[in-house]
Image (tube, rainbow, N blue to C red):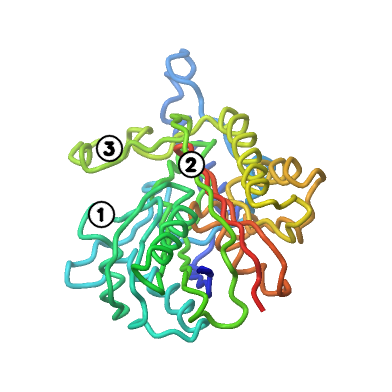
Amino acid sequence: MTVVISATGLYTPPHSISNDELVASFNAFVARYNSEHAEDIGAGVLPALQQSSAEFIEKASGIQNRYVLEKAGILDIQRMVPDIPERPNEQISITAEIAVAAAKEALKKAGRDASDIDAVICSCSSLQRPYPALAIEVQKALGAGGFGYDMNVACSSATFAIQNAYDIIKAGHGRSVLVVCPEILTGHLNLRDRDTHFIFGDASVAILVEHAEIAPPGSWAILGTKLQTRFSNNIRNNFGFLNRCDPQWRDMPDKLITQQGRKVFKEVVPLVSEMILQHLAELDLKPSDLKRMWLHQANSNMNRLIAERVLGHEATQEEAPTILDEYGNTAGAGSIIAFHKYSKDLAAGDKGLICSFGAGYSAGSILIQKAS
């Protein structure tokens, strides 16, 4: 039995924030903070906050821009949090809404009706609520059949869900599985922290995984999947329903994303590159067999080094395309956005790799081949 990726869909939010805009807001906050705390800073009680720059952001990450669902609240130095109104229970949730938008594009590209779907998996790092499952809400909004459930594996959410979809079809529990990965990540950001305020953008993707017998022309056969996890505190977010009652939660840095960037870089690069090479060997493939690598879009320096360790040379934009400059880090959606935008030119028989990695640590590898 062959399982394929039939189509993908992408929802891009209507607003964008450039590095210059983000830095202007951050630096205005820093200037105000340092002025208000000048006495304590002068006495050595508090450290002065450092200003940021567009050059620092691009050098550290490769990010130049990010798309966001809400812009004004992020840039308002009195707020520095996205201002997304809470919706009544009778209205579709914002996360489900952007998941449906991406799903409709994928279904249209595959020539598939929502009633053909046997299962919906909503897998992302930014689940809006514990229950009811967002996947079931998406299922209802689309008019899909079967069942649905949610997953969260941080930045590896999409690749882990693709393997789940693959397993569902292999086990005979369905022939068409929709994976959605809606990432509203700007709410995770500590926009007052110089080292992390620039990382995330918002986006949503959808992946239609199907039995090859019903797939449209030009689909991608899944040659194999490989997942790996290793516990680490180096990327962490402690916000959750157990601490939501704390009225000061927004002022507690560990309730938003915290990371030790140098440790992450040092530990994740070898973990991911070795996993990819092992996965290739298990399928009797060589790195030179890969026409393209769609890597997780978190940091351009990490991607460059991982690709070099796998391919044996510095990768070109054609070999390992990046969308970081435009979208920023979109967690689980990142590698799928890269695949969505940079896969149409490949020919039948060409092989590629979709790979994600992130908090956990978690890493997922999906080897695929373009069908005729």
Q: Quadrant of residue 144?
A: bottom left
Label 2: which residue? 362
Helix, strand or loop status at disc 3: helix
- Upstream in sequence: badge 1 or badge 3: 1
* Residue 269 point in image, percent of width and height: 63, 36
The one of 74 and 161 positioned closer to us in this rendering = 161
- Upstream in sequence: badge 2 or badge 3: 3
Q: CA distance from mark 2 to mark 1?
A: 22 Å
Q: Looking at the picture, does residue 334 appear above or below residue 309?
A: below
Helix, strand or loop status at disc 2: strand
The one of 102 and 147 positioned closer to us in this rendering = 147
Helix, strand or loop status at disc 1: loop
State the residue at coordinates (71%, 74%): 348
Label 3: which residue? 249
Label 1: which residue? 129
* Residue 299 point in image, percent of width and height: 62, 45
Position of residue 78 in the picture relative to residue 330 (left or right)? left
- Upstream in sequence: badge 2 or badge 1: 1
State the residue at coordinates (48%, 30%): 234
